[in-house]
Image (cartoon, rainbow, N blue to C red):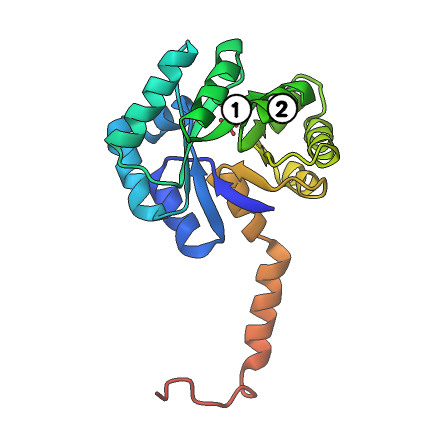
Amino acid sequence: MIYLADTANIEELKELFNYLPIEGVTTNPTIVKNSGKTLSKIIPEIQQYIGDKMLHVQVISQTAEEMIKEAKIYRDYFDMKSNYFVKIPVTKEGFKAIKMAKDADMKVTATAIFTQQQAMFAANAGADYVAPYVNRLDNIVSHGIDVVSDIVKTFQINNSKCQVLAASFKNLDQVYRVSMVGCQAMTASHEVLMSIVNHPMTDKSVLDFESDSEGVYDINLTQQ
Ligand code: E4P
């Protein structure tokens, strides 16, 4: 399973991309709003940090034709290459737009997925990724991980090329459980991703090793 950053905060992206094996960035209108910058300002800043890693940008138009027009405008405006994925919500118009995007040779992440059947439709329409929302499902007393697991199994049974990009996480337990059901990718906030790194037992072990090394690690590390 690969990890993506679900944030457009540049300070957070700097830390994540400098230190961790992060394969791309996912955005949506809320994430752009929370960055405190407009889309035209924030996307070029993100591009500087991620190079040719994946960049998922969501469209806001309501009709399929407008969604595709919007996706193409972003592609040209930001000079995006093959790492660009247009995020299309799975409304009725969205399913049509997914088919149109594939005909236009654009990569698609079908987003706002809450059921296995939405994922099937999106995959059959040609989506490269489907993004089921784990925490939002958990919040409505549904079972986010079970939905992801069903989607993964369905794609395997059908030999689908579509991959599962699990999204919407609030804690590490959700991340752990989603990683065990075979989904290919996940995207999470800086806070959730950093909670994978920060572990008090690791910190304590490192402190103990450091103290035990005194007087016995005698090779001069300042030599060239
Ligand atoms: C990603 O595709 C989604 O837009 C995002 O992960 C939703 O996460 P949230 O439920 O934390 O807002």
Please provide percent x and percent y for residue 66. 36, 13
Question: What label does residue 111 carry, if any?
Answer: 1
Please, what is the three-letter code of the amino acid marked with disc 1?
Thr
Please provide percent x and percent y for residue 47. 31, 42
Residue drawn at x 33%, y 47% is 49
Q: Give the class, few, some or many, for how many residues have Cα within 10 Å of label 1's Cα (few <14, many ≥20).
A: many
Left or right of 117 on screen, residue 186:
left
Question: Nearest the camera: 43 or 33?
Answer: 43
The yes-or-no answer for disc 1 within 8 Å of ligand 1 is yes
Looking at the picture, does residue 111 appear above or below residue 107?
above
Please, what is the three-letter code of the amino acid marked with disc 2?
Ala
Left or right of 176 on screen, residue 73:
left
Q: Disc 1 to disc 2, how far (Cα)?
A: 9 Å
Question: Nearest the camera: 100 or 43?
Answer: 100
Left or right of 35 on screen, residue 219:
right
Question: Nearest the camera: 15 or 56?
Answer: 56
Q: Which residue is mark 2?
A: 119
Looking at the picture, does residue 49 appear above or below residue 157?
below
Please provide percent x and percent y for residue 29. 39, 22
Furthest-front residue in this view: 103
Q: Secondary structure at mark 1?
A: strand
Residue drawn at x 55%, y 32% is 129
Q: Secondary structure at mark 2?
A: helix
Question: What label does residue 166 carry, if any?
Answer: none
Q: Is residue 168 visible?
A: no
Quarter of the image with the C terminus is bottom left
The residue mark sitting in front, 1 or 2, is: 2
Displayed quadrant of residue 81: top left
Q: Give the class, few, some or many, for how many residues have Cα within 10 Å of label 2's Cα (few <14, many ≥20).
A: many
Please provide percent x and percent y for residue 208. 60, 70
